[in-house]
Amino acid sequence: MEAKKNILVADDFTSVADCAITHACTIAKINNDSITLFHVLDSNSLSELKKHHKTVENLKEDMASRCKKYSDQYGVEVNSKIEEGSIFKSIGEKATELGCALIVLGTHGVRGMQHISGARALKVVGSSKVPLIIVQEKGPIHNSYKKIIVPIDSKSETKQKTLQCINIAKMFDAKIFLYKQFSTDEENNKNINNNITFISNQFNQHNVLFEIANQEHSGSFEKDFIGYAKNSEADLIVILTTVDKDFKDLVMGPVEEYVINNKDQIPVMCVNPMQSLYTGKSMSSIISFS
């Protein structure tokens, strides 16, 4: 029997955190996984506690109550942890420490206890070695992730979404829709087609159901693949965070922020590039599937 995996959910007691827990419970129930609700005690959350005349012990009681509520509702194991730290580093570090397979994070434009707005959510993404699914306030529309949109552009790094796409497709018995960028540039088209060929071959080898869709004209690629995701009633979009050429820093800016804060509130999985791919190893030599 496959070992039970753990899913970390950043919990700041807001409606978007509730939505993130709902998404995590949906995933956990299908796969018999466990969930850890993780609250970071920082200056903002301590200030909120003081404002509402609560102590850390009260917070622990509230967390325990939330664990029982969601465990009873979804029939999954839900635990909690509270630690002091920075939300930008602690969430990713705790997920790695616990050996989590996934982080689910709620993001909101209005400020909650821990102020995880869109731009701040990207900082959490950048500090994590674990893939994240970022949600807003919209729950799973199919009680699962059955339709997954994966934008494919000309960058060679886009191949690195393959592993997580295969894993999540198998997890949910889902269909992947590769959304191919339109380009009139010959070199770009060559690179886009190479990426499509590589990913298609991997999907075929691992029996992943997929379909290729095309951007019909030049224009905003992000706007068009989000529009396609909306019209397809997609459950998830998978993107790769940008990396600089020397792999010194993750460069997450307006494009990523636009995607994760899409107005249709489609959940977005963010996958960070793997540093080993920049040390001479090929994608196929390091990729492995369970």
Image: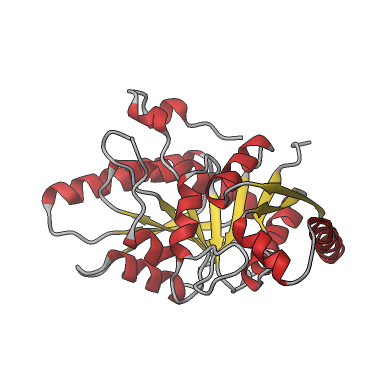
Residue positioned most to the top: 280
Please, is residue 246 above or below residue 83 in the view?
A: above
Could you tell me residue 248's position as x and y percent? 33, 35
Q: Where the N terminus falls, by quadrant?
A: top right
**Residue 178 appears left or right of 85:** left
Could you tell me residue 136's position as x and y percent? 55, 69
- The answer to whether one can see residue 267 in this image is yes
Q: Could you tell me which residue is drawn at 33 percent across and 43 percent down?
A: 243
Q: Where the C terminus falls, by quadrant?
A: top right
Foreground residue among 103 and 64: 64
Foreground residue among 10 and 290: 10
Could you tell me residue 178's position as x and y percent? 39, 56
Colour convention of the picture: secondary structure
**Which of the 4 image quadrants contains residue 137?**
bottom right
Could you tell me residue 96's position as x and y percent? 61, 37
Foreground residue among 5 and 228: 5
Foreground residue among 220 and 150: 220
- The answer to whether one can see residue 176 in this image is no
Please, is residue 228 above or below residue 208 in the view?
A: below
Q: Could you tell me which residue is drawn at 82 percent across and 59 percent down?
A: 67
Q: Could you tell me which residue is drawn at 71 percent across and 44 percent down?
A: 6
* Number of numbered discs: 0
